Image (cartoon, grey):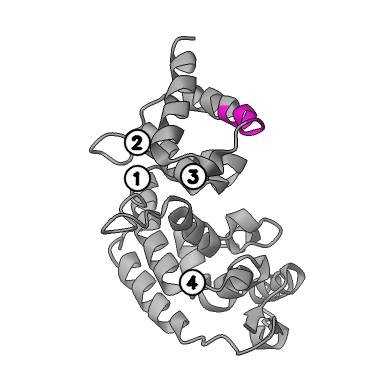
Amino acid sequence: MRYPVLTSPDASTYLFARRSGNPVEVESLIKMRGDGPELNQTFVDGLREELAEIRASYPDGLNQKDANLFEARAARAVHEGVPHHTEMLADPDFWIWLAVAHFGEIVEWRYGEPEAGTSVANYGVGARNENLLYRLWLRAELVLDEEAKDRYHLVGSGQIDFYRSHLFRQGYANARTFARALLRYQYPKADPSAPHLKVNQIRELVKRLRRLRANLFLEILGESECLSVIETEAASVVSL
């Protein structure tokens, strides 16, 4: 699959030139990568329409609660909308292209449209996991439940900081069953944003789980087994 990319240096060139009032054509910076048939880019229009519709639900901008609701809905849209080609999805330059060339308006709006422009890290420049489009896709990817009628039913649970700190940056999240189990453990209530453990407790639990990862092959465990592991470690944390 041949797909478009925008490197971090080229994205920086484009963003800073635009913000300084001397814009360059982004098309001149885009390159193609990979082999075989070329990616059909028509998915971009559909995704743009979906995200615009979600954005319209928040005419006054995003407070902290609304930001989480927006990201939960947008995560599903991005995961459903972006074609699933493994090499492409694993390439940070593809996500930079998507964010910079097509969804700059959404990125700026999500972060409050600061006068000088949001941090370029939110486009993935120098910080892959901060790329808004990639982060939304990853939120859905990590907790996807293929056995459920709605495989995205868990995407609405949890808060942004939980995903960033306790899933995206942790090696144990490579095991989707473990990621789902931890999400379900920390957010078991009817309110999908109400956590089980306090901030200091979940941080301590994550430290323990990270150490445990070195000696336990999580990929072979079922979700119920993963939950048992988490509950055992959490019991020690709560008793401190």
Find the residue positioned furthest to the front: 220
Residues tagged 1 and 3 counted as in contact (Cβ below 8 A): no
Kindly identify the amino acid type of the residue bearing the numbered disc 1. Answer: Ser
**Mark 1 surroundings within 10 Å by alpha-carbon count, few (fewer than 14), some (14 through 19), many (20 or more):** many
Q: Estimate the spatial distance between the alpha carbons at disc 4 and disc 1, rounded to whole Å.
A: 26 Å
The disc, 2 or 4, on the residue closer to the chain's N-terminal end is: 4
Which tag is nearer the camera, tag 4 or tag 3? 3
Q: Main secondary structure of the magenta part?
A: helix
Mark sitting earlier along the chain (4/3): 4
Q: Calculate the distance from the C-alpha at mark 2 to the C-alpha at mark 4.
A: 32 Å
Q: What segment carries the magenta color?
A: 209-215
Q: Residue 66 in the image: x percent, y percent?
A: 34, 51
Q: Which mark is residue 105?
A: 4
Q: Are marks 4 and 3 in contact (CB under 8 Å)?
A: no
N-terminal of the pair, mark 4 or mark 1, is 4
* Label annotation for residue 187: 2
Mark 3 sits on what residue?
163
* Mark 2 or 4: the one toward you: 2
Amino acid type of the residue that numbered disc 2 sits on in the rendered structure:
Tyr
Marks 3 and 2 close (CB-CB < 8 Å): no
- As measured in the structure, the alpha-carbon distance from the residue carrying label 1 to the one carrying label 2 is 7 Å
Please, what is the three-letter code of the amino acid marked with disc 4? Glu
